Amino acid sequence: MKPKSLLLSILIFSSIIPFDVRANGTVRGFVKDQANGETMQYVNVVIVGTTLGDVSDENGYFVISRIPPGSYSVKAMMIGYETGEHQVTIGLGRTVAIDFHLTESALQAEEIVKTAERERFERQIELSSIQISPRELKAAPAFIEADLFRTLQALPGVHVQTDFSSALYIRGGNPSENLILLDDVRIYNPYHLGGVFSTFNTDAIKNVDLSVGGFPPRFGNATSSVISITNRDGNSKEFAARGSVSLLSSKITLESPIPRGSALISARRTYFDYLYNTFIRPNSSDKNTKFPYYFYDFHGKINYNIAQNSKITLSGFYGDDVLHVEEKGWEYNPETGTSVERTDATDIRFGNSSTTLKWQYIFNPKLFSEFILAHSRFRTFLETTHDDKVEAKDEISDWTAKSDMTWYLSDRHEIKIGLDAQRLAFTMYFKVENFEWLAYKGDKSRYANFFSSYIQDDWKVSPLFDIQSGIRFTYYDLGNYFRADPRFSLRYRAQHNVNLKASVGVYRQYFYTFNPEDFDVIRLVDLWFPIDQRYPPIRAIHYIAGLEYWLNDDYYFSVESYYKDYDDLLDLNEVGREDVEIDDFLRGYGRSSGIEFLLRKQRGKLIGWIGYTLAFAEKTIEKPRASNTLGKSFQTEYMTYVANYDRRHSLKMVVSYQQSPKWTLSSSFTYGSGLPETPTLGWKQDYRLDEAGNIYGGDYYSKVPVKARKNSKRLPPYLRLDISVQRNFSFKNWSMQPFLQILNVTNHQNIFFYDYDLETYEYDRYGNIVYRKPQRKGIAMFPILPTIGVNFEF
Amino acid sequence: MSLVPQQPNRNCIVVLLCLHFLVLLYTACDLTKPEDYDPDYTPEISVFGMVSPDPRFTFVVVERTMRIGERDYLFAPDGTEHPLDTIIKDAAVKVISAQDTVRFSFHQDTSAMDYWFGSNYRQKGLYLDLENKLGVEPGVTYHLLIETADGRVVRGTTRIPGPARILSHADYDTLSYRPETVIKWQDDPNTAAFQMHFYKTCWGHNWQTGREEWIGYNLASDYMYTEPHAGLEHINDWTMDWPGNTCSDTAAIKIMSMDRNYYDFIRTNTGLAEISGTQLELLDGGVGVFGSVNFYSTRVIIESP
């Protein structure tokens, strides 16, 4: 070995071997909330009188090693909680296990304690990551009731297209590029009512981590972002209940200790169908028509502590949107010569379900592991009982087995290793009587197997400099693709309150929703398709650089710039030939870039943030191919256009002010520049040859529109101000919070789309033709909309 | 006198209130009032050109697209007529084969018969091979060249499809009225798709001529475009709507084979593409199509159901 190589090896080896391993001891354990037993993350745990310490991870776990033998005081500190303290004696090479149970405190301790956000600032290497607390989740005004995605869309870099959809477009990626995890399991279509609400019940949520880019190797199969939602474990101390009644739904969450663990169930259901059918329909003129729609969702979780180092969790999430339309009519029976009443029904259901069995096991203080078996499914199902019976189904279903291990190798290295095996089934078919259309070459379903592994090292190179490096390997059998995706992040602590960060990484996605962009304004359901041998997986490279700055203990400021380079993008070919499989999709590439500013305050009476984003999202997609070029060598032509979700400027502000323990005022403000649209510019005649050999067309009624270049115009800017006020009433054993929310206080007419009235004549009241100019009218979204509701807790 | 400590958040609230006030001012205008719509648009050359071994299907329509608000139709709902500014009468239209170049001449037919069903293309005008010089052959490539007076040039190319010779039935074979009845025809390498029509001739009033005569009714597969090189199966596995008892026992099966351009043109002017405006570029320098069709027909005897 050459001397240089030897030196390098020694340096690398020395960096990962813990110093003085045998002589020092370790303290490890969990931090939990005294009130309900929930584990707490980002709690600062320190050995008093030393510089040693750790911050609890997402499981509430901490480990502090390299502690010289002796007696110490160990403290756990978190803002809003009284400091927990344990006395420990560390022996040579010994490990001491302690758990902290922190008590919520109205008074702030004198000593310096930090917010979770500040701890994240000090600990986390990755960029573009934001954690949303339950308080922030509930503080932000929402449409009718608190909604996770409505809160997330108020963050910089996160957009929605309309008031009617909570599907998130993040840094130039479409909603299917977001990896949405609920307790570590992917949820494929987390929306109710065609996207108006998300499926997550905020009462059950413990915390939400949003990474809008540059996420580490342990997350895969997504090219845009990660939204990781962790549900609460349930109160392990005493029975508790909370709930709310809003104009939309009622929901209730029950939690209780069980032997060696805890349990939580949370359920929500809309009830307008009950109200209408019970109270309104009997008094209406149309007594036969029932209100046809409702949705529900259910979360359940059971935790069982097998031993101090072993815990098993069973959790489930089930939700459905149900549309049931009945139609009464008469059917003639030729045998009896009489007519009998007949009811035909159309049923549409779409919803998610997921079931997860998770085992957490601590092999030793430095090796924390999780093993997961899970099933997740999203399906849309339509069935009618009419004469021409229709049945249609679209489903994505996955079975997952995975393991994640965290190895606290030393104070300088934290290594994560994971394995993941998935079997996916994609189903799509449509049946009418004897006719059957199958999406996948004569099969109802197509199956894909997916294997991935990763290794990730968080390396504290020096007190000021950290590197996170890792790689993710994936094998996907449907196209026989094997890919390796390296990712790097680094953080430089320029000052005690300033972080400079940078990140670069490769991200791929192996299944995708191909909602045609031109029809994506109303997004009812996502139709998932697997990538196969015809098209390589979609690839994005993220380049991110940013600065984080704590102005003081309360105010956090960040600025981040990003550039995303997309390749192997796919668009549904709207003019593709049905008989030529390679013509289903159009390939292309794209790029998105932008800069985001965020000023955030997380503690005190006033919390919230202000964010500004300048963003660009552009696609270059091949032009649809004419038949005479298919299967031949052909110079592909491309067209470049801005994506229909390219919101160039956006300014967002969320503020919640707790005036007293009784009153809370909140406000949310959004300004966004207009989204692109493709207007009609003119007309052209549509000619055909008819079956008798004549030409038809060429008259007034056969003209078809000539459209402008795709997305070349823009709608007017979007502007909305929402406010809410909440009053807290506390009683002996319970409390209630009635609230009033007003959406779009200023009644700004935010344009959903333009309705073009291109006729050049109309009739006057005498029936005469009057010629006029073509017109367009903006169809507005939410008007001013007050809603009320009440939350309760006991 | 004791000083009341300044609330640190008060300034933030004032800023917030000021911002809200600005928002109120900004939103004073109502954007949903209808507004006149007159986009800036330069019309393009629009072409519908066909060539075929059947000279009735050899023509080229040359016009320009319309601006929004232009009224370009003969009959307005009030029955008044309007000028047809979009017709281009002075273009040089040529169809070029390997052997020859044929110049098409503009022809405007004003016969009243062609008004029927609103199909007034002949009123607008066609470029026709009036001297019938262009005898096209299947498998041969032809080029279209249009030069307008203002210097714009449109080019297109088509290869003539062969006729779809029906193999399963000879002339006056008996066609049984059973679901398993299959009609098959000869494949052709220059054909992108076939369109089959099934006619039965009945005695009735012809609204076009105003006379009682035998009329062809299309009984099956209207507007049904087969995918290329596939046989049509089960053409009568659905109940036929027999027009009456004065129909003849014979029917005509007519199959149109179309080249790739015309097939692309008709399949992409429906559905998603029609709404979104996504179009294939089938011509160089203009919109529309230059395609070709060929026909084959036979007569069969219908077995009574």
Image (cartoon, rainbow, N blue to C red):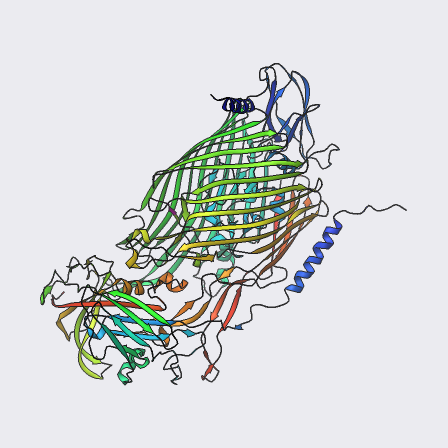
In the image, farthest residue toward the right? B1
Query: What's the residue at 30%, 53% (across, down)?
Result: A633
Q: Is residue A340 left or right of residue A663?
A: left
Residue A60, compared with residue A552, is above or below; it is above
Give x and y (percent) for residue A421. Answer: 40, 34
Residue A115, compared with residue A656, is above or below; it is above
Residue B120, compared with residue A344, is above or below; it is below
In the image, residue A244 lies in the stretch drawn in magenta: no
In front of the other: A207 or A794: A207
Could you tell me what secondary structure mostly forms the magenta stretch? Answer: loop
Query: What's the residue at 58%, 64% (across, down)?
Result: A749
In front of the other: A260 or A668: A668
Query: What's the residue at 57%, 43% (across, down)?
Result: A545
Give x and y (percent) for residue A653. Answer: 64, 52
Q: Is residue A126 left or right of residue B263?
A: right
In front of the other: A432 or A210: A210
Can residue A205 be spotted in the picture?
Answer: no
Q: Which residues are magenta?
A: A529-536
